[in-house]
Image (tube, rainbow, N blue to C red):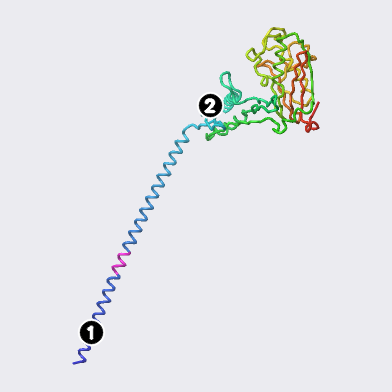
């Protein structure tokens, strides 16, 4: 009897264990099925996300291509920019000016425009400006002038042509040159006279003599640095009644006529004969149409504000100081001076 009970107990225990094992197997199968479903959903989501991103990229590439094609159809624009103000002073459309169809015509038009921009027109000033040289006043202080400004026309044309292919901005090639001397040298430039020349005039001719005096004062104590260009007209300015100049005889077309400012050519000619003793280069120099009595034949330098000028470049190797000494008794002397320290470096003819 007892044995039978043990057999029944063992059978019950085995049945319960079997049921537990089945339950575990059933649970494990459901979890595995759920995991598979999650993995598939995640995979579908990733695939959908990748497809959407690919579609966005395709659309973006297509839009970029469309914009590029539209831009390619638009004519290229070249903007000319002032390097100081950063302002666009002019915009060019090269194809409308012949670029790509008549390049020679295009270049000629650019050259003409660059010339006007640099040198100016009757109504508008250009970028080019002559140097206004520094001057020493009565107290030995330097009166600052203005630097030389040059717009390089050929360089501008080349830059515009290069930019005409793709368009864009072109900075104007503007070069600024200061006077060629050191500030500390100014106080010593009057130490040594390296060239001098004197001319005579009739002290009784009041008007003409006043004009000589005024023009001499204008060039007196002017500093001509190494490499500087001296312009008589630019230094003296207008020789008109508004600036104190008086009527006097002057040579016009081989005739002596009365005019305001007659006599200033004696100042320019005296200056010429002084600086000609040094190794300077002449930028502009003209003779009178008649022989003048105050210098030998061929040794004169005629000037007329707004017209003929006397210009030279200081290539003597050292900075110079011009001294003009007017004597009411009838003499005008122009001296060229420099520092004693520079005397041995000075190049003379």
Number of callouts in the render? Answer: 2
CA gap, disc 1 and disc 2: 109 Å
Whether residue 104 can be seen here: no
**Location of residue 278 (image quadrant):** top right
Question: Relative to the observer, which residue lies in front, 326 or 36?
Answer: 326
Which x, y percent locates residue 236? Answer: 68, 19
Is 30 included in the stretch rendered in magenta? yes
Q: Does residue 328 sit above or below 140 in this rendering?
A: above
Image quarter in which the C terminus is found: top right
Q: Residues within 10 Å of mark 1 (few under 14, many from 20)?
A: few
Image quarter in which the N terminus is found: bottom left
Question: Relative to the observer, which residue lies in front, 190 or 334?
Answer: 190
- What label sits on residue 104 in the rendered view? none
Q: Which residues are magenta?
A: 29-35
Which x, y percent locates residue 116? Answer: 59, 23
Q: Residues within 10 Å of mark 2 (few under 14, many from 20)?
A: some
- Residue, disc 1: 11
Q: Secondary structure at mark 2?
A: helix
Q: Secondary structure at mark 1?
A: helix
- Residue, disc 2: 97
Q: Is residue 224 left or right of residue 102?
A: right
Sequence-wise, the earlier of marks 1 and 2 is 1
């Amino acid at each position: 009897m007892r044995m039978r009970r043990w057999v029944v107990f063992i059978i019950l225990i085995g049945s319960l264990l079997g049921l537990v094992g089945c339950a575990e197997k059933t649970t494990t199968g459901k979890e595995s099925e759920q995991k598979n479903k999650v993995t598939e959903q995640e995979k579908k989501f990733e695939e959908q996300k990748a497809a959407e991103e690919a579609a966005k990229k395709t659309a973006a590439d297509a839009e970029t291509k469309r914009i590029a094609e539209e831009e390619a159809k638009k004519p290229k624009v070249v903007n000319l920019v002032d390097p100081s103000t950063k302002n666009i002073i002019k915009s060019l459309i090269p194809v409308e000016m012949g670029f790509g169809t008549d390049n020679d015509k295009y270049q000629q038009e650019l050259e003409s425009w660059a010339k006007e921009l640099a040198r100016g027109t009757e109504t508008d000033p250009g970028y080019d400006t002559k140097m206004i040289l520094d001057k020493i006043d009565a107290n030995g202080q330097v009166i600052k002038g203005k630097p030389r400004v040059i717009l390089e026309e050929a360089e501008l044309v080349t830059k515009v042509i290069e930019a005409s292919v793709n368009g864009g901005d072109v900075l104007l090639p503007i070069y600024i040159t200061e006077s060629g001397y050191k500030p500390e040298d100014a106080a010593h430039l009057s130490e040594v006279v390296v060239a001098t020349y004197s001319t005579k005039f009739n002290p009784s001719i009041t008007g003409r003599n006043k004009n000589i005096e005024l023009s001499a004062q204008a060039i007196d104590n002017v500093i001509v640095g190494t490499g500087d260009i001296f312009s008589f007209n630019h230094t003296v300015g207008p020789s008109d009644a508004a600036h104190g100049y008086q009527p006097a005889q002057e040579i016009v077309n081989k005739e002596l006529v009365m005019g305001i400012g007659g006599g200033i050519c004696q100042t320019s000619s005296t200056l010429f004969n002084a600086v000609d003793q040094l190794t300077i280069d002449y930028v502009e120099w003209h003779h009178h149409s008649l022989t003048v009595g105050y210098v030998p034949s061929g040794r004169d330098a005629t000037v007329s504000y707004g017209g003929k000028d006397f210009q030279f470049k200081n290539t003597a190797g050292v900075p110079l100081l011009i001294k003009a000494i007017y004597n009411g008794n009838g003499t005008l002397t122009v001296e060229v001076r420099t520092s004693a320290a520079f005397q041995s470096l000075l190049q003379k003819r």
